[in-house]
């Protein structure tokens, strides 16, 4: 963990004009860039830059599930591995799975199991790998958002894309998409993942406390953000496949 | 290309593609009378059936598909073939073109060998069985195997086999295009190389307009100044 003792405790997270440390308003997302199909070896991949977060997602499958005793004769497994690179945080992270990453892997695979048509591929597994290259709070949301694009890129049949964003409470106010400082010194952080079209919630966690009213407002912020994120995801996929789509014409200067 | 109409555009899973009562075809799903895309691909609407032609994804075996399989394991009375699908495909000795004695499968095909075979059946748990009992199904000896995405196979074959005929007429190679995206080509090394490049060209520009002309031009160019 980063040494935070030297930072004054009474840090002001929201100034008088309602701006946050990085200049955002309470309902603003950090700058986000998504790119689909960035890797050659896996069946599908995506890369996301979300504020200071840099996350790579890759998908294999459906392929034969190993070890074989894990196979489900009725449906496919969606197996997920969330992993943070040792250099993703300022103090080297000890590599390998830990309590936190095992938990995130579990909730992520459950979120994707809700949208993938698993019954179409009995006995197989769809493997999702989320690699956090640089972390700046909200990596699980960035990971899920990217992995969703990677799944579509891999041609996996699913009901919809999942968009994920956290909201929380900083300096007593409900805010969207907390960054590192806000996460560390804020009062609550509540990541959720939403099926874009139907508004179904497939992941909901909370760290800290929110009143019922605050929770409702946080949820509304995340829902709105999910809609915007969904548009970015679609845009990334369209950009990736625009060249292979209908507009291309091979003329006299064909290769 | 004329075999697709103007509805061709890329759809993303969850995208609404029809709410006028078309039947949901492959790569789609229906909910409350609307049809949504289940896969990333191109919409194809014909005769009231709306489907999504995938741009990628794994090959799923279907009965009567002719595929190229590679032997990955041997049993005393069967071979296990990798057919580029999530499921291995066992080929039983009685489905082979040979009279195989028990425990003698290795004499006919060994690990690493490839064969053209047909999917006999796929059951509901996706257990695959295949056969080699037909005159055009055989073990592959010599030549090369090129792998492409299975979704590009219809482009490589072309309408009524026009594209593959075009390639064969220029390069004089013999070959076979498996539904699983594996293509076997045999002939003069130089011709095989040209055929491979044409196949890669088609794969890369599978959805382009004027693909046949481009392939024709490429082949003409490659064989220009030759007997």
Image (cartoon, coloured by chain):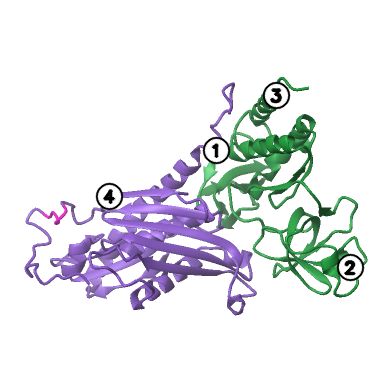
Chain colours: A purple, B green
Considering the numbered disc 1 on the image, is that residue within a helix, a strand or a loop?
A: loop
For residue A125, side relative to residue A88 (left or right): right
Q: Is residue B177 above or below residue B197?
A: below
**Sooner in the amino-acid sequence: mark 4 or mark 1:** 4
Q: Are marks 2 and 1 on the same chain?
A: no
The residue under the point 85% across, 63% down is B108
What's the chain of the residue with tag 3?
B
Pointer 1 local density, CA inside 10 Å: few below 14, some 14–19, many at least 20: many
Q: Are marks 3 and 4 on the same chain?
A: no
B163 in magenta? no
| Closer to us: A193 or B111 | B111
Please state the chain letter of the residue tagged with numbered disc 2 in the rendered image: B
Give the magenta range.
A18-22
Per the image, the residue denoted by label 4 is A31
Mark 2 sits on what residue? B94
Q: Is residue A84 left or right of residue A8?
A: right
Q: Which residue is mark 1?
A: A245
Residue that label 3 marks: B220
- Percent position of residue B223, x then y: 71, 25
Location of residue A225 (image quadrant): bottom left
Label 4 and label 1: CA atoms lie apart by: 28 Å
Same-chain check, marks 3 and 2:
yes
**Can residue A114 be seen?**
no
Q: Are marks 2 and 1 in contact (CB under 8 Å)?
A: no
Q: Are marks 4 and 1 in contact (CB under 8 Å)?
A: no
Q: CA distance from mark 1 to mark 3?
A: 26 Å
């Amino acid at each position: 963990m980063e040494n935070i003792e030297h930072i004054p405790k009474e840090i002001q997270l929201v100034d008088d004009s309602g701006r946050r440390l990085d200049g955002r308003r309470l309902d603003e997302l950090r700058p986000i860039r998504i790119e689909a199909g960035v890797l050659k070896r896996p069946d599908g991949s995506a890369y996301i830059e979300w504020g200071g977060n840099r996350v790579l997602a890759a998908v294999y499958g459906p392929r034969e599930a190993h070890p074989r005793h894990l196979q489900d004769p009725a449906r496919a497994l969606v197996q997920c591995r969330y992993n943070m690179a040792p250099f993703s945080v300022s103090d080297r992270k000890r590599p390998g799975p830990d309590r936190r990453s095992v938990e995130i892997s579990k909730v992520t695979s459950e979120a994707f199991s809700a949208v993938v048509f698993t019954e179409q591929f009995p006995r197989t597994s769809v493997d999702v790998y989320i690699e956090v290259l640089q972390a700046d709070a909200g990596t699980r949301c960035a990971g899920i958002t990217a992995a969703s694009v990677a799944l579509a890129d891999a041609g996996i049949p699913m009901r919809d894309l999942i968009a994920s964003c956290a909201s929380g409470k900083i300096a007593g106010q409900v805010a969207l998409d907390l960054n590192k400082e806000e996460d560390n010194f804020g009062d609550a952080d509540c990541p959720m993942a939403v099926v874009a079209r139907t508004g179904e919630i497939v992941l909901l966690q909370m760290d800290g406390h929110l009143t019922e009213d605050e929770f409702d407002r946080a949820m509304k912020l995340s829902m709105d953000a999910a809609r915007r994120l969904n548009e970015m995801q679609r845009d990334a996929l369209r950009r990736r496949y625009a060249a292979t789509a209908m507009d291309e014409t091979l003329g006299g200067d064909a290769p | 290309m004329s075999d697709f109409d103007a509805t061709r555009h890329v759809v993303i899973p969850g995208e609404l593609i029809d709410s006028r009562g078309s039947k949901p075809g492959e790569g789609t799903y229906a909910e409350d009378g609307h049809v949504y895309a289940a896969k990333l691909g191109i919409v194809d609407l014909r005769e009231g059936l709306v489907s999504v032609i995938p741009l990628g994804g794994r090959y799923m075996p279907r009965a009567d598909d002719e595929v190229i399989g590679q032997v990955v394991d041997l049993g005393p009375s069967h071979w296990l073939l990798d057919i580029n699908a999530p499921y291995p495909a066992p080929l039983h000795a009685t489905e082979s073109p040979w009279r195989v004695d028990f425990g003698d499968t290795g004499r006919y095909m060994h690990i690493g060998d490839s064969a053209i075979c047909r999917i006999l059946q796929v059951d509901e748990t996706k257990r695959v069985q295949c056969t080699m009992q037909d005159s055009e199904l055989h073990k592959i000896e010599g030549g090369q195997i090129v792998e492409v995405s299975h979704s590009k196979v219809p482009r490589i074959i072309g309408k009524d086999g026009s594209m593959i005929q075009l390639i064969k007429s220029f390069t004089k190679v013999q070959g076979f295009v498996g539904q699983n995206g594996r293509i076997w080509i045999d002939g003069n090394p130089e011709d095989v190389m040209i055929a491979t490049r044409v196949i890669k060209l088609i794969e890369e520009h599978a959805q382009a307009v004027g693909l046949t002309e481009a392939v024709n031009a490429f082949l003409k160019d490659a064989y220009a100044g030759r007997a």
